[in-house]
Image (cartoon, rainbow, N blue to C red):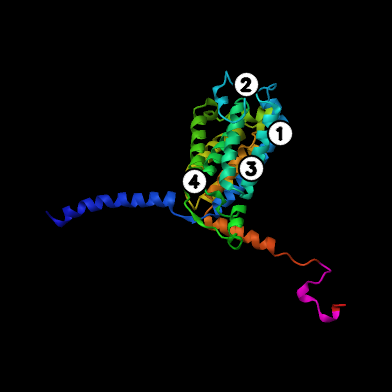
Amino acid sequence: MSPHKRDRPTLLLRPLAQLGSGWRRFWFEPGPSSTLALFRIAFGLLMVAWTLSLAPTLTAFYGAGGVAPDSSANLSGDWGVIPSPARTSALVLVFTVLLLASVALALGLYSRVSAIVVFAGVVSFEHANTLIGNSGDGLIRNLAFYLMLAPSGVALSLDRLRRSRADFWTFPPVAPWVLRLVQIQLSIGYLSAVWHKVQSDLWRSGTAVSYAMRVEDIHRFPFPGFITQSTMITEVLTYGTLVLELSLAVLVWNRAARPWILTFGALMHLSIDYSILIGFFSLAMFVTYLAFLRPETATTLVLGARDRLMTIPPRRGRASAEHVRPEQVG
């Protein structure tokens, strides 16, 4: 047997070995935990706002005398800790626990337990009344699930401060697999949105955005007339949305294109949120964008903010202790 034939299996196995190595690096190669810490803080703050938004309609949407469907006719209502029918005292208790857990998650206090309680609370409220949720609520539920699996309190947290005050501003390495799940969630979400939109005649004909602009009961601020009355502009916006969402799903994985494509995505969501009432969807998407922030960049941003906040100039008209001359004393 010639040496070339003996080397052929090795040549065939080498690409597989490289693929396996890349797979392990993608999911499990440890890196600084700064991105995960920022993601936890942002999601915790989002959850505080989401929970507080439940307060004005707590009994109307979830109470026994409100619009919540009967659990006997809605099997999904059996999932969660909110009883059916729900008394006001039970609703207030679950609401309070969820709010406290959200604050604790943002601060990084008992982070793992807080994340579990937050996930259970979100699921409980969503399943207690399935008539009022939207895609933003579903995204929040998924992000809560992912964060529940992560060691999110390893950095920039009260948990870290309790363990080692001197190492608070360090970012211990962690495997990125939870953030990878968030990244894939974003990519699949945009792909799914494009796929469902191209099935619609409104999107294929270029009129979908025009219809959205004319549904006045969901508008936050009215659109200018020159936009709603222009066929060309609404077609550009309709097809442009499809192109941008497809680009977000694909080009976000390219490091060179990522900052640009996420910037355009943020502008798209800001424009939608400015004009249309869509709940917490845009804010949840912005939190999801943080998963694509490189750990090195996140570390630089955190330490830079720390240095700016801790460098406080002395007040005018008051000499600092280092600059007081002896003759000024007494």
Which residue is labeled 2 in the image? 69
Q: Which mark is residue 55?
A: 1
Q: Mark 3 to mark 1: distance in Å?
A: 15 Å
134 lies left or right of 221: left
Query: How many residues crowd mark 4 within 10 Å: few (<14), some (14–19), many (20+)?
Result: many
Q: Is residue 197 magenta?
A: no
N-term mark: 3 or 2: 2
Q: Residue furthest top?
A: 73
Helix, strand, or loop for circle 3? helix
Residue 299: image location, x then y, percent: 56, 58
- Residue at 64% from the left image edge and 32% from the top image edge: 230
Which residue is labeled 4 in the image? 178
Q: Which mark is residue 102?
A: 3
Q: Which mark is residue 255?
A: none
Residue type, numbered disc 3: Ser
N-term mark: 2 or 4: 2
Helix, strand, or loop for circle 2? loop
Disc 2 vs disc 1: Cβ atoms closer than 8 Å?
no
Is there any visible trace of residue 318 in the rendered image?
yes
Residue type, numbered disc 4: Val
In depth, the one of 186 and 122 nearer the eye is 122
